[in-house]
Image (cartoon, rainbow, N blue to C red):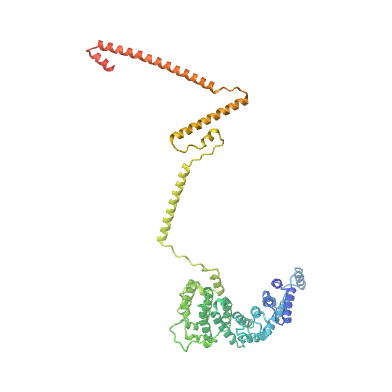
Amino acid sequence: ALSALERLVDSPILHGAVAECVQMLTDLVKKKDTRVRPQVLAVFLKLRITGDMLDAGGAKKKKGQTELEAELDQDLEQGRATMAKQEIKRVATKILDSVLVAYFRVLKMSPPPSELLPPVLEGLSRFAHLINVDFFSDLLQAIKALVLSGDSSDGEALLSPAGAIHCVLCVFKCLKNQGEVWDLDLQDFYDSLFQTILRIAAHPAEEQEQIPLLTEALKITLYDLRQLSTDRIAGFVKRLSTLATQVEPHYALGVLALIRQLLTRYPKAKRLLDTDSACVGVFNAEVGNAELSNALATTLWELHVLTHSWHPALATAAKEIVGMAHERAQDEERFRAMITLKSTDQLLRLHSTATGGFNPPIKLPATHPLHALQKKLLRKQTREDQKAKDKAKAAARAEQLYISPPTTTTPFLRALHSPAGTDGTAANQSDTAQSLLRAYFTARRKASTAKSLASGTPHTGSAQKSSAKKKRKQQATAAANSDKSSKDNHHNSSSSKHAGAKAAVVSSGKGTGVGKKLIAKG
């Protein structure tokens, strides 16, 4: 139900349904005597009420426009279903009055319910610039009583650090909106804000998230409004420097940016940066009044600690503030590049470490020449190793022999795959091969016989085949022998003829030179 109400009031256009919803919640707070859950009052934080909605004056006639034309424009606006400015002002005023009535009802309780104070004070600080001066006196008394209330019945502080900051913001926003109201004693609010800084520094893990809200309150109280004494500013600056040493770096950067703004606005407070200046009295860090702490009797030694911070941006910001004691005319570009000149919100966004690491990231150092050479040699060795591996793989692929398995099974293959002898000798292997061949031919003969019987052709016996084969072999042998004998007879006759001729030549040419030559040739 509450989520539905939040979606209803979270509308840029204020209409009657939003006003009825707010009035219903206000009546519920009154009926229950403020015994409601904090989520009920948190619905008011979704309202989008601006100062333009509360400005007086309706639709005015344009210059040179007749009454008829003005009436026609008004009719056209109604035809476009737009709300008139007077109607918007009426609805916004009604909604704001209902919200303030609910808030005042909670603040006037004695004591106020501690669980309802956070949404009430946050809402008051949000709508403070819209509060009419008629409500301001009552609001100031209620908030002042709340600030001075001290501890609750269980011994804890009635106001949390966030609640105390919202009280100060509410009062000073009203003062900023109503410039004529200055005859007020605001010392209690300054003291409350001064003590809140120490409470956050004492519990940084739980309360450091309130630093953006704290810097907003300090800026509006110490910087935006009237001029304050140097002693008060020095007390706040000293306590802020202590806070910067206790919180995370991105929060500390926001605090240092505020310190620079205060030292720029109040130059006399720069005595805190001078270690050689004469000091009068003793600094009291535990007092609750900034003016009575006598901060000018000490120095901002915390900044020198921060210059050695592990966070480079925080160390640079601390050095920039320390250098303010001796800065004169300086380079404009260097001045604009200073970290502490940025706003607190911008520094929190740029240097947040919520996701870990540095933001922005730190630049890596330059690569050493030997490291670069080592990387180059390593890449070269890697390429060579890869080439060697590729070459080995190519050689292995070239030497591979792929044999496909037989597609059919024959008796010979079955005989080959049958078990062989076990002694491993050559004779046994020969016998095995012969037995395989005999088995193969026997299987062939059986297959041929079965095929001839199946076709009806008479089968010729093995004896007839062997005799015919033997006869053909004998005929071939006889022919070969006859050819050989004829060749031998021819060779013998030719050799005898040559011998007779040689003898005749020798006898006829004996003792002559011609005979010797013929003999030599022979």
- The residue at 64%/87% (across/down) is 145
- The residue at 75%/76% (across/down) is 20
Question: How far across and down, in percent of the image, does residue 402 sit?
Answer: 50, 40
Question: How far across and down, in percent of the image, does residue 416 sit?
Answer: 51, 35
Q: Quadrant of the C terminus?
A: top left
Task: Mark yes or no: residue 234 visible.
Answer: yes
Q: Describe residue 390's horizontal placement relative to residue 173 as left or right.
A: left
Q: Looking at the rendering, which quadrant does residue 505 occupy?
A: top left
- The residue at 55%/33% (across/down) is 411
How many dots with numbers? 0
| Nearer to me, 370 or 68 | 370
Task: Mark yes or no: residue 323 visible.
Answer: no
Residue found at the far left of this picture: 511
Q: Looking at the rendering, which quadrant does residue 509 occupy?
A: top left
- The residue at 23%/12% (across/down) is 510
Question: How far across and down, in percent of the image, does residue 244 sit?
Answer: 51, 78
Q: Describe residue 394's horizontal placement relative to residue 94 as left or right.
A: left
Q: Quadrant of the N terminus?
A: bottom right
Residue found at the far front of this picture: 423
In the displayed structure, would residue 235 be above or below residue 446?
A: below
In the displayed structure, would residue 77 be above or below residue 285?
A: above
Question: How far across and down, in percent of the image, does residue 426 sit?
Answer: 43, 35
| Nearer to me, 240 or 38 | 38
